[in-house]
Structures are given as C-alpha cells and as structure tokens.
Image (cartoon, rainbow, N blue to C red):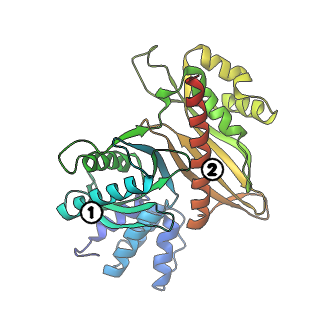
Amino acid sequence: MINKFAQNSEIKMLVEEKQINPSQFKRILSNKGIFSLVRNAEELSNQIYPFFFGSRDIQLMKELMQSSTSYEKSSIIKINPIDEYETLDEFIDTINEDIQQYRVKNLKYKIDDIHKDGDGNLHIRMTYNKKSKGKTELIKNQTRELNIKIEKRDKEKSLLVDIRQRDNSDLKEFDLFIKSLNRIDGESDLFNIEYLTLDKLSKENKIKFFDELIKYTYTNWRLEDIKGVDFKKDEADIDDEQEEVVSSDDLAGINSAIFKGSSIRDSGIVKKFEEQGFYFTSMKFKYSYNATVDSFIIDINFKGTDNIKIDIVKTYERDENDRDLITVLPVSEQEEIILAFQEASYNVYNKLINSQKK
C-alpha cells in the first residue's frame, strides 16, 4: 500500500540506477499508452522525469523491484529437540505453540501465517521491516518476507528447516528470530540449532563435498558447465578470511577434468589449491533440461554466512540461434529445482559427516 507521494526525482533515480529493470519499466509506460524507444537506463530516466505517476503505478514499481530478481534462494538448518518426544509430530506441535505465543506478543518479527500441511509439516510466513541507508524515500522502509518450512525426515530424530530468503541479511534476521523463539517461555531451550557448515568437514571433505555434487544425477536435468568457483584459504594459515574467485583459465582446467569423467581433485589446478591450503566455498553449476530448451545456473555456497545456501542465480531459454536468453522460470519449476538440490546437498553433506565419525 502506498500512503506517501513519490517525487519524480526519486523515480528517476530508481530507473537510472536500474533498481527497476528498464524493460520492466517500459511495460509500465506501454500500459499507459507510452512507447519508449530509448536504449539505456539513463536516457529512459531523463525521458520519464516529467511524467506523473499515481499510487497504482508506484505500487507496481515497488512490486517490480521485489520481483525483477525473482529467483528462489534458500538455506537449510536442522533443529534437534532437547527433551524426548514419542514422535516428531509432538515436537512440531510444541514449536507451533511457541510460535503462536510469539505471534501474540507482537514482537519485531510478524507471523503473517502459520499452518500445517497434510504431511504434518509446519509452514510459516514471517515478515519484518528493514530500513535501507542512503535509499530514496520510496524504498527506505522495506517489508521483507521469509517463508519457512519445518519438516520431518524419515528415520531422523531432528527436523529440517527450509528457509526462503532474498539475501544474507534475511538469513541473519531469521537466525535472531529462531533463537528468540527458542527461549520464548523464558525458561530452558526447546531445541538445539544445527548449522550445515564447511567448518564441520575435514580439509579433504571440503573439496569432496563439491566433487560429489558434480557427480550427482537428476532425472530432468544434465550438467552442462561449471560457471564459477569461489575459494578461501584455511583460517589456520592466514588471518585474512577474504574469499577469492577462480580465474577463467583455472575454471577451464576444472571443467576439463569434470567432463573427462575425472574427480575435480585430479585436476592440477585443484591439487595446487589444496597444497596451498585453499578450499572451495561456492560452486555455480549450469544445468540444461533434458526435455526442453530451458537451462539454469544454481549456486551452492557457504559465503556471507557459514550456513549452506542453495540459490538459483539465472534461468534461460535457448532461441532459434542457439543463444541463451534470460527468462524467469515459473515458481513451480524453481521450487522443483530448489528442492532437488537441497536434497542432494543434504545427502552429500550427511554422508561426509558420517564418514568422519568412523
């Protein structure tokens, strides 16, 4: 809902800084009978500066700013009950009761919706207000939304929490929320939070994690390329924890090893990294659909926050000239991708953790 007039200078800045995709903004104009032929954001911002935009237009702009990068981003954690429960359903019911208590208290994080699905998993939609420094008045106060699913896993005594967020700042807010929820009654903790982090993997398994993901097979997609790798030096070797990006030449060497059917550890580049104390913190995979001309890049990473993140970076459709054109896949298809890669990452991670216990 828009309750404050937006200055033309603010709208001009949004377009000029590409906080709204220019092609998306042209659609707003075309709906008003205005067809712009300019080619870049700066020219477009100058062109629209004299125009008047009503509250409905401003609302649409805000929605476009939130959806122009509408790729699913996720993270997963585990929560383990401190007390013993006969079933995980009882544990979920206890968490549900705590969230209802939190909801009544009307604290920082608003619980807009909470319900159980047919399988007994708990779904939560949580929102909070975020103030952005140095932004125009139009977007200075943002309402951020996180969708959370707390689900049971077969043969496991813990619950898996699937968090959908826009960026790392949302994950940090979720972390504060789940910790405050844990002590909502002011007494002892209800559960332990278990993060899926690289720190828990041995030096060898930090590389093997990504190696195993490369080998993972899917019914609907095939691996086409590795589009990017980030790495970091072991904290024991350096004081600076800054992450670095693999060069294009080194990336070509890694891809060469992969598509020859070798382990990435067999690549001379990776051997060099290991010898120098480096390990991967992120890998971007490009997969193509087996049955259509669509493709996508998915980033499985531990950057920014230590906990694992599974993010769709871009989705494409191939045209008749064999070029990849950026297009946003339907939410249902993105959901299928996220769930499949969450499952793969979770399985590989647990397999490596269990191997270290032997």
Image position of 196 (left or right of 252): left
Q: Residue at x 58, y 54 (%)?
A: 339
Q: Which residue is tagged 2?
A: 297
Question: What number is the disc on residue 100?
Answer: 1
**Disc 2 crowd, CA 10 A, few/some/many (<14, 14-19, 20+):** many
Q: Quadrant of the C terminus?
A: top right
Which residue is located at x 61 percent, y 60 percent? 336
Residue 96: image quadrant is bottom left
Image: 136 above or below 204: below
Quadrant in which the N terminus appears: bottom left
Q: Nearer the viewer, residue 307 or 123?
A: 123
Residue at left offset 47%, top offset 44%: 157
> Quick check: 44 left or right of 144?
right
Residue 215 visible here: yes
The image position of residue 30, as x and y in percent, is 50, 81
Where does residue 167 sit, x and y in percent of width and height? 41, 50
Q: Position of residue 86 (x, y in %)?
A: 42, 50
The amino acid sitting under disc 2 is Ile
Q: CA distance from mark 1 to mark 2?
A: 38 Å
Q: Which mark is residue 27?
A: none
